[in-house]
Image (spheres, helix red, strand yellow):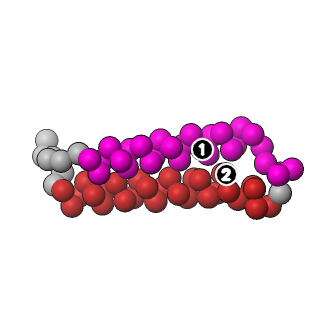
Amino acid sequence: MERLDDSQLNRLAEISADIAQVFFATMVVGPFLTGLDKLHPLVAVLGLGISLGFWAGSIRLAKERP
């Protein structure tokens, strides 16, 4: 199986970071802006966890070198 080159890894890292930002904005920040009474703790925790997972993946991809 062929390994990804530097530019492909960097692009995947950027995409992963973008996905993390979308999850964070929609599941954590959005409910804070509409009111804390509408914030469901499980949604906030899941949003934060998913975001951190994608951000960690982004960092790992950015550090990986072929």
- Which comes sooner in the sequence, label 2 or label 1? 2
On the rendered image, what quadrant is the N terminus found in? top left
Q: Amino acid at mark 1?
A: Leu
Dot 2, crowdedness within 10 Å: few (<14), some or many (≥20)?
Answer: many
- Residue drawn at 23 percent across, 58 percent down: 8
Residue farthest along the right direction in this orientation: 37
Give the percent coordinates (x, y) of residue 3.
Answer: 15, 46
Give the percent coordinates (x, y) of residue 12.
Answer: 32, 55
- Residue drawn at 68 percent across, 57 percent down: 29
State the SS at label 1.
Answer: helix
Q: Is residue 47 left or right of residue 12?
A: right
Give the percent coordinates (x, y) of residue 7.
Answer: 21, 61
| Magenta-span inclusion, residue 29 | no
Residue closer to the observer: 53 or 2: 53
- Residue drawn at 38 percent across, 44 percent down: 57
Marks 2 and 1, Cα distance to the nearest angstrom? Answer: 7 Å
Q: Which residue is mark 1?
A: 48
- Residue drawn at 75 percent across, 55 percent down: 31
Q: Is residue 60 left or right of residue 47?
A: left
Our reading of the magenta stretch's main secondary structure is helix
Q: Quadrant of residue 30?
A: bottom right
Give the percent coordinates (x, y) of residue 65.
Answer: 18, 47
Q: Is residue 35 left or right of residue 29?
A: right
Q: Which residue is mark 2?
A: 28
Dot 1, crowdedness within 10 Å: few (<14), some or many (≥20)?
Answer: some
Q: Amino acid at mark 2?
A: Val
Q: Is residue 57 left or right of residue 23?
A: left
Question: Answer yes or no: do the residues labelled 2 and 1 have beta carbons within 8 Å?
Answer: yes
Instruction: Identify the mark at residue 26; answer none if there is no mark.
Output: none
Bounds of the magenta span? Answer: 36-63
| Magenta-span inclusion, residue 57 | yes
Q: Is residue 44 above or below residue 12?
A: above
